[in-house]
Image (tube, rainbow, N blue to C red):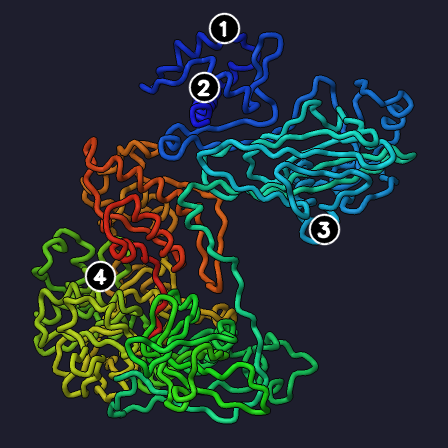
Amino acid sequence: MPKLIESLQSGLLFIEFLGNRLSGKRKDELRNIYNEDFRLRNGVKHPNFSTVLYALRTFNQVDIVKGKIYRNGHFEVRVSSDQAKIIGPQQTHRHAAQKSTTKESPGRFTTKSDPGVTPKKKKQASDQQKIIGPHPTNVQGTQKSTAKESPGCSTTKTEPGMSPKKKQASDILQKMKTNRKEMMADKEGIQITSVPKGSDGVVHHTVAFEMQPFVIKFSILNNGSGMVYFTKYTVLDRVRCYNLKDVRKVTKANPLPLCPGESYDVVLSYFLNECGYFPATVYFEFQLDLPKPVTFCIVREIKAVVQTSLGAELGPVAPYKPYPKVKPKRPIKEVVEGIPPAGSFQSVTTTVKLGDYKCPGYLRVLAYRNMDDSEDLLPPARQQLSQVKKLLESALDMKNYSLRFHLLLHLEEIQMEEDIKNYNLYNQTMTKDQGNRKLLVLKVPGVAENRPSVLRGDCLWVRKSGNTTSSMTVYKGYVHRVELDRVKLGFANRLLDIFITNMTFDVEFTFNRLTLKLQHRAVDLAVKHKLKEVLFPSETASKKVSVAELSMLNHRIENNPEQRKAVQHIIAASSKPAPYIVFGPPGTGKTITMVEAINQVIKADPSAHILACAPSNSACDLLCERLKPHMSTFELYRMYASSRDPNSVPKDLRKYCNWDEKQDCFVFPEKEILMKYKVMVTTLFTAGRFVTGGVPVGHFSYVFVDEAGQAEEPQCIIAVAGLLCPEKGQLVLAGDPKQLGPIIRSPYAIQHGLGLSLLERLMNRKPYQDLDSRFVTKLLQNYRSHAAILKIPNEEFYNNELQVFASQEEREIYCNWEALPQKGFPVIFHGVLGKDEREGNSPSFFNVSEIETLVAYLNRLEQTQGKKGLPKLSAKDIGIITPYRKQVMLRSGGICGGVSGTREEHHHHLHGAKQPELR
């Protein structure tokens, strides 16, 4: 079979090579062309002509009529010879309309004689037949059908811009959604069976990639008492990879009469050189020859999977069964407080109080009613509705700044409350932790990808399942550790004392409101400290200042005019009190620019104190990594939140951060200690600790925010409001408003601007909009990408201004890789028809076909590394990004067999997708 498939692949390539020259050629003519022009083409020796022709005939690709060879008219095949080198020819089968030797009129049978069709019946069919069901009416389109309509079919009209064939397919597929059972049912005595056997009209078929091709045979049996005409069959789906064929070549113009007890076969054959999931909807149409013809249809579905042995191994271990969602209605008798992890509730001297900022009850009612003035709306909510709508629809300014953001943050909290309920678990067992018997371990599928978001120090509530008493006790557990799919919880001894193996619990998740409260306080402080010229700057707010030449510490910046200009303007504070923006498209070195500016500030003013922030811990770690070569542990300090997993902290940053080995946790020093450091690096949320702890306004002469486009505005100003003096201090924002912005859950909050970062809002205002160099610098030199990769985003988002400055050797080293479809273009776009799956109780998706395709490419990389001028590769040279944890796990397992490196190494590099880091 593999040799036959190989011969078929060569035959398909030969057909593509011939183009229109194939049809009607004699066998000896094609043999000469094959041997002289094709067989040794491109240095590849293909099988002999007889073997290739045999394969093409076996798989119904060609027909031989009177010694001449014709291409099968049912479909055409496109083969990519370049990608065939990796995983075989990429074939796209198009189901074309079959050409008939007799002219066919829509809505009429042809005049060709068929057994069992009397002249009377021909006349009746010719005069009276109307197409009933999802088809065009007749050739004029003016006659109205009076024929009886069979279930599952209806008369349709062709919409402008859509061909009748596409309109028909669209209508039938739409009917399948609402009337699936009727459409798939055998009817009017016609029964359709298949080999392999189907169930409820669906044929599931899995075939090993190495065992292709395969066929599915449909047998159509007239089990009724009268004649039925078989008039049409087709595949409705747009993506085609099938060859449908029958001996009599049935069409509307060439119908087949089926007498009672008579059967007929239609064969659907696959040939797929791709792994994946290939569903098909096959439509069969019939007609009853009554006084008025009646058309009816029967539909069958095929769900075909082509997989390698790796794909079979990585498939779901158990069907996906989501946890049942049941809302307990029993009242709470009491809440038993749990044991928090060490360091999570350290006492910090509070100078600026953090309020509770509870969401008003009326706002929840309005949100649940979609802001509509319905009849059942309670009076307090109705009284507030107009004010809420007015505030949402108003433009943001300093007068409504705090009120508007309070409202948006409350709407976001309402959505978060609803979202977290989806993760509640019922009838779950816990186990005692083997390392610490005072902790209980709960399995939480999806926790590794923040679904639900659970961090160290968070709490959740559990209650014993099956309790039928009128009231009940709830135990509050604190998260001590988060692992791949489980959390370790600290409960009070009262639960531990009664805990026994196999005891079941209902689990209710909560979210930590700290991040919301910090944002609420920040917008209040922004108004209190009069940050208008920071948040709503005007061009007149800045005086002309002289920009001095500087000797850059990073010599690469010396040769980059935009980076050098940005640093010079930041040092000169040319935009003060307005923020200075470093607009950095991907790969242009905005973080390096920020680091250089920080170093230059310290060099120019040894008394300066700098707060450097970013929305995520990973971005802050990168800042710290770049700063530490120039600073000692007495100058640079990286402050982590207590929720940070200490194992995720880079080892070389341990001595710069607030980790305490003796207490085995992160600590929060008093402000007197913190204020001694020249540069503090922390996330925007953790920067709120400085406000709470009483670090005075004006202590930080500069606040730098990297990746500022990823933070909503209230989050960004946590590091500004209550810390930066607008007259003396300077705010510097770096980021790209053209890239992904903040993650917001509430549709109301998104619609009314909470998802708009401060950086993007400012970039839409003058003077930033005009790219005035006193206020903003746009970096233009890209150090990361090949020109082919940069081309489209450069044209679409960056006015074609970006320049390719990546190392020529690095960017072009794989441009001549033999597996590239186009040499010199180092990008492969490979669509995979796979199926997203889940297993067990895990909400995480994975797609085995994508993994198989990926492994094929990686194996090809491994086979070619170190050859023909290509470098040798290690695991750290390969980055693979996917948003789902389960896909990461399966890809790690699949890849380790094909590429050198440990599973741990692959896991580190594969888990590349950014996840929201709440604190």
Label 2 Cα neighbours within 10 Å, binned few <14 / some 14-19 / many ≥20? many
**Numbered badge on residue 181:** 3
Instruction: Provide the residue designation for mark 1.
Output: 28
Q: Residue at x 40, y 68 (%)?
A: 447
Which residue lies under the disc numbered 2? 14
| Horizontal side, residue 674 vs residue 326: left or right | left
Which mark lies nearer to you, 3 or 4? Answer: 3
Dot placed on the residue nearer the N-terminal end, 4 or 2: 2
Q: Earlier in the sequence, mark 1 or mark 2?
A: 2
Residue 252, above or below 601:
above
Residue 107 visible in the snapshot? no
Task: Determine the secondary structure under disc 4.
Answer: helix
Say above or below: 282 vs 678. above
Say what amino acid the circle numbered 1 marks.
Answer: Asp
Judging depth in this view, the residue of 350 and 100 nearest the camera is 100
Q: Which residue is mark 4?
A: 591
Q: Marks 2 and 3, how far apart in space?
A: 44 Å
